[in-house]
Image (tube, helix red, strand yellow):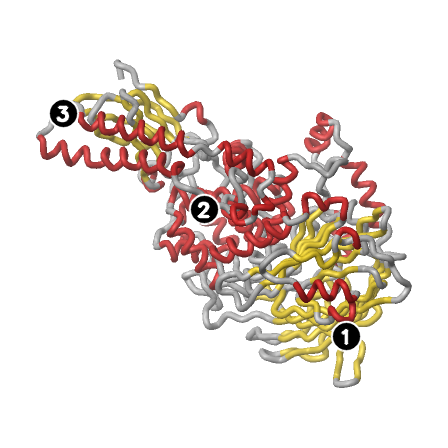
């Protein structure tokens, strides 16, 4: 099918016809999915349930694990073998993570210009970590009642193939016994988990530490793309019962619910645990008790998680532990919010981590579905930002010696928590294949992150939005941009491609192509249809197009599959006064009246009252919130609106004349895009005109539009305003003179 698609693109280049309908270039709809981008009655997926015993030795950073894996096959074909991920082998000199590296020369030159540490120096540190890789399997066996027998297996890089004694048919299951051990990596060097050594002992954030089945679906079979590092994971859902053993004094947070607090918490902490409520934050471990004495005996922490795609945990003897409940509308019950962090970062983590997490759950639930899990935990450590079901890793905050921090540090921390907690919707529930389609969770999550930040506190989103839109337009015009659907290992600028381009593209779809109400409804339908399932990119495209009732093939193809920039220029403007009868004049000027009103409505947006999450929490209203709130001046916005309304009324009262304005727009960049045109008039009035992208359908490189106005104009501008994806604003404006 891929060859067929490429062949079609070659026959009908984007430049010739950018308006091919989606179904003319998309893969055929498989029987398990519908043309509407939803699962069909024939949809199926497999399941992996775990019972695990994990022991972590802080003296050696070594993990020993024993697991009972129950794998259920639901596919309509016999399954004779399993592939399980062995991701600790990423840290192997024989692994793809090492062998597939390509150090681009321009990256070295950029490092040298900036005076930064050479990538080779960092790589040398990483190699030292690889040399310590020692993953060992002690058992791979089939469980049969009370007996077990070894199964043949082979390991290929980060995958292990296990041959089953007989093929499974739909509805059958197999139970495997697994035993393994390995030494955790230093997370300050590389990795999505590991340990951070401090003078008070290690802090652990542990993930990718157990063999787990590869995702099996109807599109590609097993997802066996090796773990390269940048691209993440593709996993099955299941229930987990996990016991984690660590020395007494360590506090453990993990995916799921803690089952035995009365056995692992000292009496004072247990009493505080039982007092946690929705009314206020409770410090289960206050700062005065953060550095616990580590004992020689071990404690078993037991957790249970239902219908999750993974299981991760964090542990330290240095943690402060705060918690509260929040009730997400529509959720089955209150959600336990927890944050665990060390005194070194307490000034910024205290309250802010829980506040950002709580706001995220409520806002994401509003745009998708009620958060389905009973808890959400934010933990500090060496990992800058990583997400797992019901637990996220956030670290590396830089504070001053006195505990103060800059506005940028605060902004980055809030953004980080929102982004990582938001991943508990994408891909922890809407479980796309991260290994192959990084953008399908990162981009969608960043899109919702931006919407969520906009309602957290004043200006936190506004300060970055203009820069992000410009960054995307510059990326498209750089000559280095790549299709969003490119192979993840081939993407050179991951943040610009898989994160920003997707998020800003969807933001533009919401505000400039559709409208917020239509887009929000469509996005929620997609999320709910694929909750606890495995969507593909084409499911997303079809779901949004179907829900909005509009053919968006030009957008999906141009934004996700092509690399042309947006650059719309105004070539010429010709203005002529014309004479027509009164009735015809009213017809011609009706569109201008609507455009005048559209401009006033755009100004009115700045006068609307805004409510933020921090308004409900006085403890969050620090100096940065107060400073930013003072910069929002609704009185000035109302004055600008009054002046614009007065100018519009004066313009409409002027003597009865009619001007024909012919404007020629040229598509210099190549990407077709809706035309947004601002016309300014003598006297200060202005109008906004919107035309759909289909205006380019007959001629993708040139458009001639005719406007009729009441009075003489001073300027015509395309793509006005700060939030524009046009890569060359110098050709967007045209000053109208008497000779035009």
Q: Residue at x 39, y 27 (%)?
A: 569
How many marks the image carries: the answer is 3
> Which numbered disc flags the more N-terminal residue, 1 or 3?
1
Q: Is residue 480 left or right of residue 366?
A: right
Q: CA distance from mark 2 to mark 1?
A: 46 Å
Q: Residue furthest top?
A: 739
Q: Residue at x 76, y 69 (%)?
A: 243
Location of residue 115 in the rendering, given as x and y in whole percent from the top left corner:
75, 27
Evaluate whether residue 447 shows in this view. no
Determine which residue is flagged by label 3. 656
SS for dot 2: helix
Q: Is residue 442 above or below residue 219?
A: above
- For label 3, count other residues whose C-alpha is less than 10 Å away and answer few (under 14), some (14-19) or many (20+): few
Numbered tag placed on residue 557 in the rendering: 2
Q: Residue at x 80, y 80 (%)?
A: 149
Which of the pair 273/171 is nearer the observer?
273
Q: Label 3 near label 1: C-beta < 8 Å?
A: no
Determine which residue is flagged by label 1. 177
Location of residue 305 in the rendering, given as x and y in whole percent from the top left corner:
65, 68
Location of residue 730 in the rendering, given as x and y in whole percent from the top left corner:
44, 23
For the C terminus, which image quadrant?
top left
Q: Label 1 near label 2: C-beta < 8 Å?
A: no
């Amino acid at each position: 099918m891929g060859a067929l698609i490429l062949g079609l693109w070659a026959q009908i280049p984007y430049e010739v016809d950018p308006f091919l309908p989606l179904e003319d270039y998309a893969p055929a709809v498989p029987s398990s999915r519908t043309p509407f981008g939803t699962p069909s009655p024939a949809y199926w997926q497999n399941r992996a349930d775990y019972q695990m015993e994990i022991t972590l030795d802080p003296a050696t950073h070594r993990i020993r694990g024993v697991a009972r894996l129950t794998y259920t096959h639901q596919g309509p074909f016999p399954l004779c073998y399993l592939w399980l991920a062995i991701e600790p082998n990423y840290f192997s000199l024989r692994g793809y993570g090492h062998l597939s590296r390509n150090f681009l020369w321009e990256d070295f030159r950029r490092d040298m210009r900036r005076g930064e540490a050479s990538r080779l120096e960092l790589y040398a540190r990483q190699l030292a970590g690889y040399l310590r890789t020692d993953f060992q399997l002690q058992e791979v066996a089939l469980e049969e009642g009370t007996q077990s027998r070894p199964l043949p297996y082979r390991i290929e890089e980060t995958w292990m193939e296990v041959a089953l004694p007989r093929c499974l048919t739909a509805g059958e299951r197999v139970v495997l016994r697994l035993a393994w051990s390995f030494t955790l990596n230093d997370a300050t060097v590389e990795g999505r988990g590991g340990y951070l050594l401090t003078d008070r002992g290690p802090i652990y954030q542990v993930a990718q530490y157990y063999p787990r089945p590869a995702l099996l679906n109807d599109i590609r079979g097993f997802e066996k793309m090796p773990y390269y590092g940048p691209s993440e994971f593709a996993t099955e859902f299941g229930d987990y019962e996990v016991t984690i053993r660590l020395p007494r004094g360590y506090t453990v947070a993990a995916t799921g619910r803690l089952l035995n607090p009365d056995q692992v918490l000292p009496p004072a902490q247990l009493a505080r645990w039982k007092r946690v409520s929705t009314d206020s934050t409770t410090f289960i471990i206050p700062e005065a008790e953060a550095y616990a004495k580590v004992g020689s005996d071990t404690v078993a922490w037991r957790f249970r998680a239902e219908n999750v795609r993974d299981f991760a945990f964090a542990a330290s003897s240095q943690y402060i532990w705060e918690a509260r409940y929040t009730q997400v509308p529509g959720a089955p019950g209150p959600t336990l919010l927890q944050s665990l962090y060390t005194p070194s970062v307490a000034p910024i983590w205290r309250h802010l981590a829980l506040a950002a997490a709580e706001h995220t759950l409520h806002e994401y639930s509003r745009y998708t579905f009620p958060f389905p899990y009973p808890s959400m935990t934010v933990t500090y450590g060496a990992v800058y930002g990583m997400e797992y079901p019901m637990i996220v890793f956030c670290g590396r905050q830089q504070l001053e010696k006195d505990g103060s921090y800059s506005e940028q540090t605060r902004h980055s921390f809030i953004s980080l928590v929102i982004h990582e907690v938001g991943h508990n919707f994408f891909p922890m529930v809407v479980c796309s294949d991260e290994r192959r389609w990084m953008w399908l969770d990162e981009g969608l999550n960043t899109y919702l992150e931006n919407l969520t930040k906009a309602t957290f506190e004043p200006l936190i989103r506004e300060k970055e939005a203009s820069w992000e839109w410009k960054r995307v337009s510059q990326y498209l015009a750089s000559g280095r941009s790549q299709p969003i659907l490119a192979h993840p290992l081939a993407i050179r600028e991951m943040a610009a491609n898989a994160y920003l381009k997707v998020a800003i593209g969807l933001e533009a779809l919401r505000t400039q192509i559709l409208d917020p109400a239509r887009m929000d409804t469509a996005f929620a339908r997609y999320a709910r249809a694929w909750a606890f399932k495995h969507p593909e990119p084409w499911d997303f495209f079809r779901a949004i197009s179907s829900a909005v009732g509009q053919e968006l093939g030009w957008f999906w193809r141009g934004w996700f599959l092509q690399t042309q920039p947006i650059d719309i220029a105004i070539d010429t403007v010709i203005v002529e006064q014309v004479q027509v009868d009164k009735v015809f004049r009213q017809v011609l000027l009706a569109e201008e009246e609507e455009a005048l009103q559209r401009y006033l409505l755009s100004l009115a947006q700045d006068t609307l009252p805004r409510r933020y999450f921090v308004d409900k929490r006085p403890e969050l209203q620090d100096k940065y919130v107060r400073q930013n709130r003072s910069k929002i001046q609704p009185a000035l916005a109302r004055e600008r609106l009054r002046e614009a309304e007065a100018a519009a009324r004066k313009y409409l009262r002027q003597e009865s004349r009619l001007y024909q304005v012919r404007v020629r727009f040229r598509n210099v960049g190549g990407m077709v895009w809706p035309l947004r045109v601002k016309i300014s008039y003598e006297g200060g009035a202005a109008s906004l005109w919107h035309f759909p992208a289909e205006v380019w359908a007959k001629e993708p490189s040139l458009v001639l539009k005719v406007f009729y106005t009441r009075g003489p104009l001073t300027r015509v501008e395309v793509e006005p305003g700060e939030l524009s994806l046009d890569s060359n604003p110098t050709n967007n404006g045209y000053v109208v003179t008497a000779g035009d």
